[in-house]
Image (cartoon, rainbow, N blue to C red):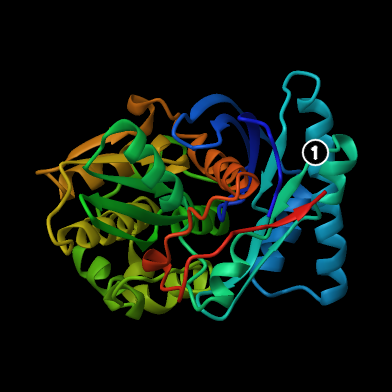
Amino acid sequence: MFKNSKKQIKALGIMNGTSLDAIDYGLIRADSSLKNLKFLKHQQKAIPKKLKEQLLRCAQNKTTTYEIAQIQTDLGKLYGKHIKELKMEWSWDIVGLHGQTVFHEGKKSTLQIGIPHFIHKEKPKPVFFDFRTPDVISGGEGAPFAPFFHNQIAKNQGLNFAAFHNLGGISNLTYLNGTTQLAFDTGPANILLDAWIQKKKNKSFDKNGEISSHGIPDPLTVNEFLKHPFFKKRPPKSTGREDFDLEFVLKYGGKTFKQLSFEDQMATLTEVSARSIAQAYLKLPTPPKTIYFYGGGTQNTYLMKRISQNLPEISIENSDTIGWPTQAMESATFAFLAAARFYNKKVHLPQLTGAKKACFLGSVYL
């Protein structure tokens, strides 16, 4: 338990997403009740190309333990470099570090790498990290964790019937309807699109969904993709690159997918994300009136359009409309979790992850 007298703090959250597009740094203000949360600042910092390639190989289980040890150190050094730059402009009291997920299997094990030492070295403030392990040890999926933050935002803003939705590499939702709370991964968001365009065109992503928007989804192929067992699972459930990668595209798309034009392939993969998201909402007890989207996928206008067209009865909004910028929500989540741990608050909701009991989340580097 932490003993502290600070009634209000600034917390810096650091988040590496599955898509490996950048590292997000988000600064929030929180008080000891967690009822007065405020977004302050956000910055994205680039990951050098070589390190990005190494992290991807790590996540694909194509590295040795020797290499993982070195990559973990190199990522920690990169955090330190970024912290050195940020402290010239920002100030903070604590840090919440997510790290880079290189393996995740719900209820069994999870691994996020990136040594916190280098953050602490540049600015000696408490660094909270390894948030997911306590949930997994308690029998939980270890994901998704953003709902703990969404639940607090909803309480603070009086949102009794809404949903929050992250479009990162993986797609996940939080559903809040009075006393009913659900949260789970729905499947892919950007991960298949990014993987396919990298393989075929050596590009990082389809900017604004421009290429996809010039294609036509093949409905039969979309249906084949949606036969993956994950889509039939009941919540709580989580997923990652272990389920949705190039192997998934080649296995479930089959010959038909290969015969499509590149534009049609991208449109088809977009439709897999959009349809799987829509199906998740349509299976809820009562679909929400509004969904607040955030994450890198909100920049893909074609994906957002397809989601909206698959959910015509639901209002589609970005999280900016409630004071939390779309690109900052994930890093703000881990700033919030660090603040909760600092103030000895169990914001953990075991019913959302399948854990046996509520627990404190995160270890700390003092």
Q: Where is residue 343 in the image (x, y as percent from the top left)?
A: 61, 44
Q: Position of residue 91 (x, y in %)?
A: 73, 24
223 vs 316, nearest the viewer = 316
Quadrant placement of the N terminus: bottom right
Q: Name the amino acid type tagged 1.
A: Lys
Whether residue 210 is visible here, answered yes or no, is: no
Q: Within the image, what quadrant is residue 252 found in?
A: bottom left
Determine the residue located farthest toward the left in the rendered image: 313
Q: Position of residue 143 (x, y in %)?
A: 48, 63
Whether residue 206 is visible here, answered yes or no, is: yes
Residue of label 1? 125
**Identity of the residue drawn at 60% across and 68% down:** 134
Left of 221 or right of it: where is 287? Answer: left
273 vs 235, nearest the viewer = 235
Left of 157 or right of it: where is 366? Answer: right
Determine the residue located farthest toward the top in the rendered image: 89
Q: Where is residue 351 in the image (x, y as percent from the top left)?
A: 36, 67
**Identity of the residue drawn at 48% across and 66% down:** 358
Q: How crowded is mark 1: few (under 14 residues within 10 Å), some or many (20 or more)?
A: some
240 vs 159, nearest the viewer = 159
Q: Total number of numbered labels?
A: 1
161 vs 103, nearest the viewer = 161
Q: In this view, does 70 lie above or below 159?
A: below
As helix, strand or loop, the secondary structure at mark 1 comes to loop
**Identity of the residue drawn at 71% across and 67% down:** 58
